[in-house]
């Protein structure tokens, strides 16, 4: 019995890359690429120290956990105190993915180019597409 168990475990170990999920469609692949591009745009806004460009990536109607005006004030203060920064994605996965709405689990690091301290985040972002563009509609901090 032990040798049967050992043989089964060895067989399963050889299948480490096999997944049982359904294959990703071309449309899903394209949507994932669009959202990754969105986060690249967010990174470019941080790198440029462009508070207005960064705030424009949030839905104007956002209310959770901050309003759009609160986000604008936060990014204005961030760049005034710390300057431009690198936005590095440490992990990104898709919880839900649709043509006009996506829920993304993301872990990231924001590191100012100077010696000022940055921060890391681990959150669940809800993105919406309006007029062909993606926006962050809300986020929830994960720990």
Image (cartoon, rainbow, N blue to C red):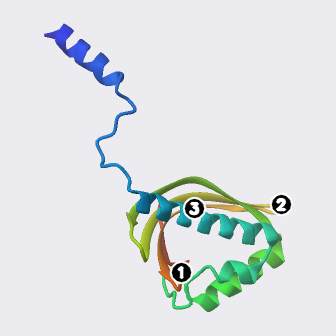
Residue at left 17%, top 12%?
4
Residue 143 appears anywhere in the view: no
Residue 96 appears anywhere in the view: yes
Residue at left 51%, top 87%?
62
Name the residue nearer the viewer: 13 or 119.
13
Q: Earlier in the sequence, mark 1 or mark 2?
A: 2
Would you identify the image quadrant in which residue 118 lies? bottom right
Tell me the CA gap for discs 1 and 2. Answer: 32 Å
Task: Give the residue at mark 2.
Answer: 113
Would you identify the image quadrant in which residue 119 lies? bottom right
User: Secondary structure under badge 2?
Assistant: loop
Tell me the CA gap for discs 3 and 2. Answer: 23 Å
What label does residue 120 carry, if any?
A: none
Give coordinates of residue 5: x percent, y percent. 20, 15
Give coordinates of residue 100: x percent, y percent. 43, 77
Task: Give the residue at mark 1.
Answer: 132
Give coordinates of residue 111: x percent, y percent. 74, 59
The N terminus sits in image quarter: top left
Task: Give the residue at mark 3.
Answer: 36
User: Secondary structure under badge 1?
Assistant: loop
Q: Earlier in the sequence, mark 3 or mark 1?
A: 3
Please indicate whether residue 18 sits to the left or right of residue 114 in the image: left
Tell me the CA gap for discs 3 and 1. Answer: 15 Å
Marks 3/2 in contact by CB < 8 Å: the verdict is: no
Residue at left 66%, top 70%?
42
């Amino acid at each position: 019995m032990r040798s049967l168990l050992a043989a089964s475990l060895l067989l399963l170990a050889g299948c480490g890359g096999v997944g049982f999920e359904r294959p990703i469609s071309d449309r899903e692949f394209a949507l994932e690429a669009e959202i990754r591009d969105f986060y690249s745009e967010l990174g470019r806004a941080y790198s440029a120290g462009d508070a207005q460009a960064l705030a424009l990536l949030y839905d104007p109607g956002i209310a959770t956990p901050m309003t759009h005006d609160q986000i604008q004030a936060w990014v204005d203060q961030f760049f005034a105190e710390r300057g431009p920064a690198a936005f590095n994605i440490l992990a990104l996965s898709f919880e839900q993915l649709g043509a006009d709405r996506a829920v993304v689990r993301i872990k990231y690091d924001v590191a100012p180019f100077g010696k000022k301290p940055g921060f890391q985040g681990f959150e669940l972002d809800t993105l919406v597409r309006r007029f062909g563009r993606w926006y962050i509609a809300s986020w929830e901090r994960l720990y």
